[in-house]
Image (cartoon, rainbow, N blue to C red):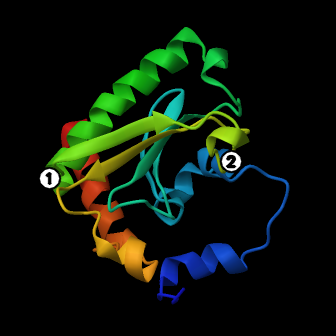
Amino acid sequence: MENMWSPWRGIYVTSPKGDKCVFCEKARNPNDDEANYVVHRGHVAFVVMNIYPYNNGHVMLMPYRHIPDILEFTGEEMAEMDALLRLSIQAIRSALSPEGFNIGYNIGTAAGAGIAGHIHQHIVPRWNGDTNFMPVLAEHKVISEHLDMTYKRIKDSFRRLV
């Protein structure tokens, strides 16, 4: 497999790892939203860019509370997660004009959750032809825009909508 340069990954890879939940850290630091790629904050949940995106504009929605399963959502958390899902789709459509979306939860490590202890929902924008020969033949995934630029576009879109 050939390596590709991804400058934003270096910060995470070289940063010290602890026992703290990365999502809880993002939730606790509203003054660092740009550095943490938080695009929108609600009352009980928030929206953050995935720094290892499957596609441009990949965001995650999660409650502020550190819980592992949607069955532990309060009614308020469930309602806000649904509202943030709709708002996120509007914001991403406005900012990036995708042709579709993949949306879902990975509940538990066996289901693919990279951070299983803090439930989160993925929203992945999709375009016709965004999956091509690169991942299959060259073992590469092409992300067409730097994460910082995508963050600014989506954050601005949220600001216009709320």
Q: Which numbered disc covers residue 14?
A: none
**Tag 1 or tag 2, which sits nearer the N-term?**
1
Vertical arrangement, residue 42 with respect to residue 95, above or below: above
Q: In which quarter of the image is residue 12?
A: bottom right
Residue 97, percent across and down? 14, 52
Q: Which of 135 and 150 is in front in this view?
A: 135
Q: Nearer the viewer, residue 49 or 134?
A: 134
Give the structural element (helix, strand or loop) at label 2. Answer: loop
Q: Is residue 70 left or right of residue 145?
A: right
Q: Is residue 141 visible?
A: no
Which quadrant holds the N terminus?
A: bottom right
Residue 80, percent across and down? 44, 22
Residue 102, percent across and down? 35, 42
User: Given the current orientation, which residue lies at the most extreme top position?
Assistant: 75
Give the structural element (helix, strand or loop) at label 1. Answer: loop
Q: Which residue is drawn at 16% across and 48% down?
A: 99
Q: Mark 1 points at which residue?
A: 97
Q: Distance between the residues labelled 2 and 1?
A: 29 Å
* Amino acid type for the residue under numbered disc 2: Ile
Q: Name the residue under label 2.
A: 115
Q: Residue at x 25, y 60 (%)?
A: 153
Please tell me how crowded label 2 is: few (under 14), some (14-19), or many (20+) other residues with Cα within 10 Å: some
Q: Is residue 33 left or right of residue 124?
A: right
Q: Is residue 38 left or right of residue 103?
A: right
